[in-house]
Amino acid sequence: MGEWMRTAVRRTGLTFVAAGGALNGISCSGEDVTSPTTGSLEITTATSGPDPDGDGYAVAIDGGAEAALGVNATLHRNDLEPGSHSVRLSGVAGHCTVAGDNPRTITIAAGGSATVAFSITCPAQQRPRIAFTSSRDGNSEIYLMNPDGTGLTRLTNTPENESDPAWSSDGRRIAFARYPDVFVMNADGTGQTNLTNGAAWDFSPTWSPDGTKIAFIREANPPGAPSFSEVMVMNADGSDVTQLSHTNGIYTSAEWSRDGAMIAFTAYTDSPSFIGFVLADGSREVLIAGGGDESARDPTWSSGGKIAFSVTPYVFGEGNEHYPEDYDIYVMNGDGTGRVQLTTDLEFDDLDPAWSRDDRKIAFVRYSSGHSDIYVMNADGTGQSRLTDHPASDYDPSWSP
């Protein structure tokens, strides 16, 4: 074998087998001539829309470990076995939509390559806002603000007093009270419509999670009869009004649970106020806090079934009368167990808690000397900050989705 041939053999890893002085077989052992055993995959994302997911996505192949992938990015894999593979994109924000199947199934051949392209659309995201009542313009009106207190917008402007704003679960409508009726309006304040039309004094509306019904409080006081009020429910257009509660007490607030199963309320008879719930079909009422030696009020539901509320102990005076101390905000389970105190201010009354829709924040009202402002805190009571600061009173906070 000549020197040039020996050099070629060394460089390529070829093995020549000689028989009878002639070359009759060649075997290949070098990597550069071995048949490939794996394939490659290119995964791309293309995101459109004004509100993309800020932290990007994650991608997993065949249920394996996830790898980070940007909103407009490409990921390469060069080590996939030949055959069928599943590719899943995760970490997509709730307001964004992935076009086509997810996961995708692709087939890779040995030495071949494939591409999976995910197209994601992210429309403008609806930002949470807080509706509330304020007397800053002379009478009680409904306003909106951002969760940091900025972006103040007035929604109602009438000689009557409005209060008790409550968002529908889709964030498009707000129910509210305009004495003596329950109204509904669009989220921008347009389309204000009377639903109850003077049948009694109706207030404290609250939407069912599916948006088809509104529960509220109706106070009726016929001439010569004792005052009382009940929890009522009607269709979202004001039709088919039905009474749910049956204790002949005085009910003062109502809020529908996020799962639609029950309506929490504040009520009292001849004792300090108490809170409970009535099943959405009116079949049963349950007392869960307050009455006796404490006054509890303002229940509001989290999506996980917890209740934030206000409570204060009642103590005996010299003539055996009861009087309240300062109210604070607590959280408890839906059955009244597991109380946790969130605010501990000894100078002010903390009332009217309202959960944000993601359960991370609670807005509440701090009262002092006939004046009130709206505050917000983390769901564990930390990070308390003031949102409104006006000589008039601000109250009735309600979070949008």
Image (tube, rainbow, N blue to C red):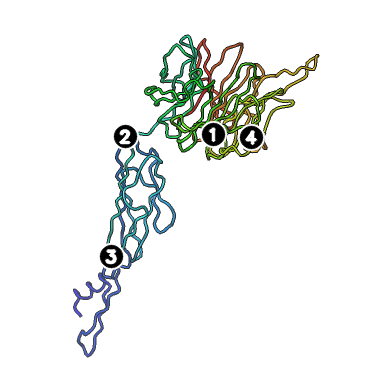
Q: Residue 70, relative to residue 35: is it above or below?
A: above
Tags 2 and 4 in contact by the CB under 8 Å rule? no
Q: Which residue is mark 1?
A: 256
Q: CA distance from mark 3 to mark 1?
A: 60 Å
Name the side, left or right, on which 150 lies relative to 3.
right
Outermost residue to the bottom: 20
Q: Which residue does the numbered mark 3 point to in the structure image?
A: 111
Tell me whether circle 2 and circle 3 mark residues in contact (CB < 8 Å).
no
**Residue 351 found in image quarter:** top right
How far apart in space, not on screen, are marks 2 and 3 (Cα)?
A: 40 Å
SS at circle 4: strand
Q: Amino acid at mark 4?
A: Met
Q: Secondary structure at mark 2?
A: loop
The residue that mark 2 highlights is: 50
* Quarter of the figure with the C terminus: top left
Give above or below for 13 relative to 55. Answer: below
Between marks 2 and 4 in the image, the one whose residue lies nearer the viewer: 4
Mark 3 vs mark 4: give the one in front.
4
Residue carrying label 4: 332
Q: Amino acid at mark 2?
A: Pro
Which of 361 and 213 lies nearest the eye of the viewer?
213
Dot 2, how many residues are within 10 Å of its Cα: few (below 14), some (14-19), or many (20+)?
A: few
